[in-house]
Image (tube, rainbow, N blue to C red):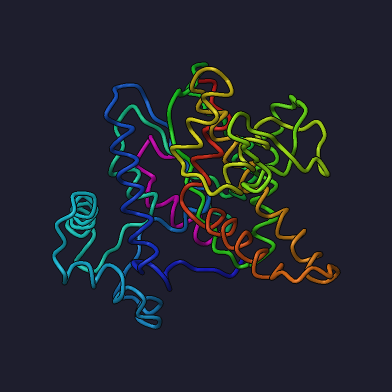
Amino acid sequence: MNYRHSFHAGNHADVLKHVVLLALCDALVAKPTPVFAMDTHAGRGLYKLDGEAAARTGEAQDGIARLLAEAPRAPPVLRYLGAVKACRQQHGAHAYPGSPWLLAHALREQDRIAACELHPEEANVLRDAFAGDPRVAVHARDGYAAVKALLPPKHGTARFARGLVLVDPPYEAQLDEFDIALAAIREALAADDTTVPCNNDLLAANFVEDGDRVWLIDYEYSGNNDPCFELGNTWAECELSIDQLDEFVTAYYGRRLRHKIARARLQGIVGKYGWTLWGCIQNGSSAIDFDFWGWAMERYEGAVEVFRGPELARLLDDVQAAD
């Protein structure tokens, strides 16, 4: 791996990620029970924005520097800026906190943090940065493999009931990174192999109401499948909201189950990826006058947005929850 986050520290993507990360931490520490946090691609934990790497790209100018100049008032952003200020009071005026530093700053004495970094040099710097903090364990290993090895987390013989996993890879592998993300989803979903009869293609046009009843049509792809695929695929293809998916899954199971809601959403996301392939095949073979390519790319972009976004790690965590 050649990626060094020093070239990109404090850019607009860092700002968004870190604002959300701190908000999640604050929500978790609102309860007294211990929290476990994992950062799969931790970097070195602390950066210098006046260093050669940051100066070469200047990306922080459109990120943290711009935010500091605009004096925002939104509470989550002010919370983030307060953390940056605390970091600079401790490490100098040009310091910028990476995710591990922010986790250590936001979490408490009873909480635990696992920071994974594959690059040896970065891992050594990270280990030195937290040498005096017993809450932080630095793992010089592949973050994706660590998810399987370190979850569900334990403290002694007791399991942590709450926590978060931050997955923000460098995407050096480009499209191959999505295969890794898909593998992580597949592993998380594999814990439940329940199947039921499904239509497997419930887009809005396959619901027909005659004023008295609702009919489901088009059983070309029907067969036994994970019920959460039917729920998630229907959510995705009918363009329902997240709240509607919550209601949909709750109505099916008779009670609200966090891991089933997460499972349905993951299945819907993976379904977008599958329908992308279907659309590409149709674009090259179908005689129907329809923009199959545009249809496929809409689904592909929807899947990519989640693969690259901050929600994937939470969904992978939620789907393995015991509720």
Residue 161: which quarter of the image?
top left
| Residue 128 part of the magenta-drawn span | yes
What residue range appears in magenta? 120-137
Residue 62: which quarter of the image?
bottom left
Q: Nearer the viewer, residue 15 or 97?
A: 15
Residue 15, image x, y percentages: 33, 61
Image point (24%, 69%), residue name: 94
Q: Residue furthest front?
A: 211
Residue 215, image x, y percentages: 68, 34
Q: Quadrant of the N terminus?
A: bottom right
Q: From what the image shows, is residue 7 above or below residue 107? A: below
Residue 139: which quarter of the image?
top right
Question: Is residue 158 visible to us here?
Answer: yes
Image point (74%, 62%), residue name: 279
Left or right: residue 243 versus residue 191 is left
Image point (44%, 53%), residue name: 126
